[in-house]
Amino acid sequence: MKNTFQLPENGSNYAWSFDGVPEENSLLLGFGPVVVETPAVNLVFSQPRALLGERVHARFGTEFPIRFDMLDTIHGQNLSLQVHPLTEYIQEAFNMRYTQDESYYILDTEGEDAAVVRLLAGIVEKFLPKELKRVMVVGLGNRGMTADALGNCVLSHMPAGGKDPHIGLIAPQVSLVTGVESADIVESLSARLKPELVVLTDTLATSRCERLGRCYQVGNFALRPGSGVGGAKKIEPGARTISLGVPLVIKLSDLGVRGAGDLAVTPADIDEKVERCGKNIAKALTLALCGGQRE
């Protein structure tokens, strides 16, 4: 929208770029050399039947029931969250005769998960310290087990090194492989490198199958690796910490299977979900930490 309509670069938010509704727009009427500007809603009031037709006018009266919005979520930032009530509720609570149904015509895209990446990056940015010289990004989990390899997948798509911040990528593996707790490795490295920020990424467990590979958890707290399927030592890096994860495993007992104990399963397309979610987290971290300049 900025490029197409030459909008100022310092605008706060252009996601909701244009609302084509009579109450918020004007009509320019030309009478020879004279141009008169009048609120567009005056046309609705003065010529409702000619504008809307008899059938639409019979239902909506002198209200224009269609709004045309031009939205830009590529470079215009994020849209607000909206809730549209059911027709019955909006009539009772707000004395309005209709609710808002929506349809979209997509003109351009920036990739299937671009909006997810920008949303995650925006959340991460809120947790960043003001001064950031060194960051330690930790990919937790077992790289030899697909469902537990999310953290390692994140690292494989992230840049290392650089300056302001310098990014260190750490993959401590699991104690079953190394004989050392992930928490001990992370805490020791953090004490030695003294980063201003430690980012922990890991596979999560969920009790609801509809969340598998479909939601992201971001928090300003440390993770306890493996807590969803038995538990391990909590990581305490001694620095500001951000944790990111995606639920990719679920216990059979949560699916209604009796006698399964702590046995956990994954979706059939786990390879695709790990790669997709890992890449999204990596892109979001790169965008938040480096402005996307070191992809």
Image (tube, rainbow, N blue to C red):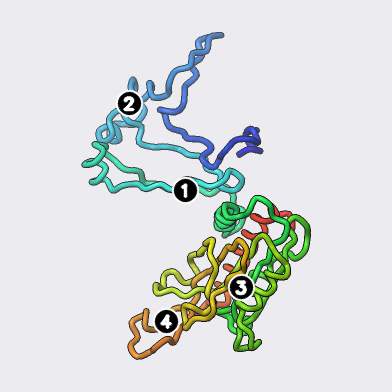
Q: Quadrant of residue 239?
A: bottom right
Circles 1 and 3: CB atoms closer than 8 Å: no
Most extreme residue toward the left is 92
Using the image, tell me which numbered label, if any, was put on residue 151.
3
**For mark 1, what is the residue?**
104
Q: Is residue 198 above or below residue 132?
A: below
Q: Would residue 228 be seen by someone viewing this image from the given angle?
A: yes
Q: Is residue 9 above or below residue 121?
A: above
Kindly state the secondary structure of the residue where label 4 is placed: strand
* Rendered-image quadrant of the N terminus: top right
**For mark 2, what is the residue?**
48
Kindly state the secondary structure of the residue where label 3 is placed: helix
> Which residue shows up at 74% across the image and 58% down it?
294
> Which residue shows up at 56% across the image and 39% down it?
14
Query: Disc 4 residue type?
Result: Lys
Circles 4 and 3: CB atoms closer than 8 Å: no
Viewer-nearest residue: 179 or 99:
179
Horizontal and vertical percent for residue 65?
A: 35, 36
Of the numbered discs 2 and 1, the one sitting upstream in the chain is 2
Q: Quadrant of residue 152?
A: bottom right
**For mark 4, what is the residue?**
251
Marks 3 and 2 sit apart, C-alpha to C-alpha, by: 60 Å
Of the numbered discs 2 and 4, the one sitting upstream in the chain is 2
Circles 3 and 2: CB atoms closer than 8 Å: no
Marks 2 and 1 sit apart, C-alpha to C-alpha, by: 26 Å
Query: Disc 2 residue type?
Result: Pro
95 relative position to 64: left or right: left
Marks 2 and 4 sit apart, C-alpha to C-alpha, by: 60 Å
Label 1 Cα crowd, 10 Å radius (few <14 / some 14-19 / many 20+): few
Q: Nearer the viewer, mark 1 or mark 3?
A: 3
Q: Nearer the viewer, mark 2 or mark 1?
A: 1
